[in-house]
Amino acid sequence: MNKNVVMILAVVALAILPLVLHHGGDAEFSGADGQAEELITEIQPDYEPWFTAIWEPPSGEIESLLFALQAALGAGLVGFYFGRRSATPKNQEPDAHPLAAKHAQH
């Protein structure tokens, strides 16, 4: 079996397996900030935060949108970096690229 097919099947299994394991149970996911706040108030109910946020999003959906936008920008930046790093320079012949020459031998 092709390695790519095996890897695609593994990724699909990793995406579906958590949904199957938590089926019917308490599958509510929360962020680390919310879990930390809950634990802090459980340990010390009188705790008062020493810092407040400058701006808070008007709703949870806007907060999720900003978080997704931040993740997408980060993924795009990482993809752009690795794409530029692995691209063949324009003034260089494709056969002169060390990886192209290595693949040409095989």
Image (cartoon, helix red, strand yellow):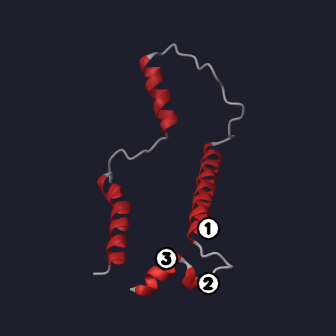
Q: Residues within 10 Å of mark 2 (few under 14, many from 20)?
A: few
Say which element carries label 1.
helix
Q: Residues within 10 Å of mark 1 (few under 14, many from 20)?
A: few
Residue occupied by mark 2: 93
Instruction: Pick whichever, 45 or 33, lies toward us.
Output: 33
Q: Residue at x 55, y 78 (%)?
A: 97
The location of residue 51, given as percent across then percent down, is 64, 23
Q: What number is the disc on residue 84?
A: 1
Of the residues tagged 2 and 1, which is closer to the observer? 2
Say above or below: 32 vs 7: above
Q: What is the spatial separation of the Cα atoms under label 1 and label 3, in whole angstroms?
A: 15 Å
Q: Is residue 80 left or right of residue 41?
A: right
Residue occupied by mark 3: 99
Say above or below: 92 vs 72: below
Say which element carries label 3.
helix
Q: Residue at x 52, y 34 (%)?
A: 33
